[in-house]
Amino acid sequence: MKVKKIETLYCDAGWRPWIFLKITTDDGLVGWSEITDSHGSPRGLKGIVEDLSPAVIGQDPRATERIYWDLYRHTRQSPGSVIQKAIGGIENALLDIKAKALGVPVYELFGGPTRDSIRVYWSHCGTTRARAWQVTNTKKLASYDDVAELGREVIQRGFTALKTNIVTPGDKPTVPMQGFQGGSGTTDQNVSFETIASLERLMTAFRAGGGDSLGLILDLNFNFKTEGNLSIARAMEPFKLMWLEVDCFDPAALAHVRRSTTLPICSGENVYTNRGFRPYFEAQSMDVASVDVIWNGFSQSRKIADMAETYELNVAPHNYYSHLATFISAHLCATIPNVRILEVDIDDVPWKDELVTAVPAIARGEMSLPTAPGWGADVNETVLKQHPWPKA
């Protein structure tokens, strides 16, 4: 069995593209992965995959570890970022092929499963209804009463936790997040009184609708420096958040925030490989490690999770993509002993379920582990082609 062809495929998922990697072998097996990069260089990923393909084509796809390290050495002068996303995508697609060839789920290749289901939380809750309600055919987040109503909906649909962002409801609701289409964010990353007051109203409304037992997560992304992150953390303490999510490229600065608040701190979604996570763990910068298995690749994600376990930390996979990525992230959760919870987006484009051959089985806030060979789902290319990106 040899790798014959590697393709990068795009589709328009409303306010961002979804990007998939397809590897075909000479005997017709197909492996899939997702390499979505919505806010960095979506077009650049295709070029990187094309540049790396000669090192993979003609190889036995089952030698996933060897191929990973060949690609790592090939790109070691440009580590991380979109390079790592491309390498991770190639590795994940190769694992899909290997597991399909053996007729087993991917987690069986890594000693799994450690569990039969995974607790999940509703991500970008309210965020999507503020920035893209027209695309998702959901109710616009026009008022704080709508926020409370959404909190009740979360509970009614069986979820036990949600994550939201810096959202201000209204006739023209705002999501001032760096990196998001239509978002603002500021160059100086200062926090204003108005922002803190708005977040207090947002959390009050979610708590009123969802009740005291609903786990609330607030994601600040890269919007503030240490001072601002800490000011918001202290303001959020009365709401007893499940965690405050903070992106920060300085482990010591993040550790200062963690030491200065009673809230648990989650971070790491933009950190690559175990080398990248190690200084954060050594500085005791976080309570929960957010590991992106799509961007890091499966083997690196497991190594990060294994290292996190030695620091008594649990992992919450970062997952804001299509259903395929949710399946891949679920396989990671199935192979490690230190899972906190899995992120999933519920509000999305209406055809999301049609894009894949199987959808995650979620009930009562838990996702059942997939049992089909490989990741358990393939991309429906007919549906993908119906939603070209970029739009003509």
Image (spheres, rainbow, N blue to C red):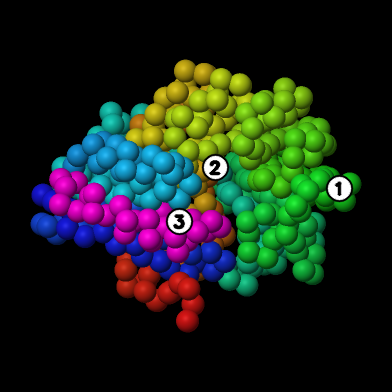
Earlier in the chain: of badge 1 and badge 3, it is 3
Q: CA distance from mark 1 to mark 3?
A: 32 Å
Is 48 inside the magenta-drawn segment? Answer: yes
**SS category of the residue bearing label 2:** loop
**Residue 391 in picture, x, y percent from top left:** 49, 77
Kind of residue sitting beneath label 1: Ser
Kind of residue sitting beneath label 3: Thr
Is 368 inside the magenta-drawn segment? Answer: no
Residue 170 in the image: above or below residue 154: below
Return the residue found at the far front: 77
Q: Which residues are magenta?
A: 34-61
Which quadrant would residue 7 be assigned to in this image?
A: bottom left
* Identity of the residue drawn at 77% across and 68% down: 172
Q: CA distance from mark 1 to mark 2?
A: 25 Å
**Residue 219 in picture, x, y percent from top left:** 66, 44
Kind of residue sitting beneath label 2: Asn
Decide if residue 147 is in sight here. Answer: no
* Identity of the residue drawn at 28% across and 31% down: 110
Q: Residues within 10 Å of mark 2 (few under 14, many from 20)?
A: some
Earlier in the chain: of badge 1 and badge 2, it is 1
Of residues 257 and 333, the one nearer the viewer is: 257
Circle 3 residue: 36
Q: CA distance from mark 2 to mark 3?
A: 13 Å
**SS category of the residue bearing label 3:** loop
**Residue 145 in picture, x, y percent from top left:** 79, 58
* Identity of the residue drawn at 31% across and 59% down: 50
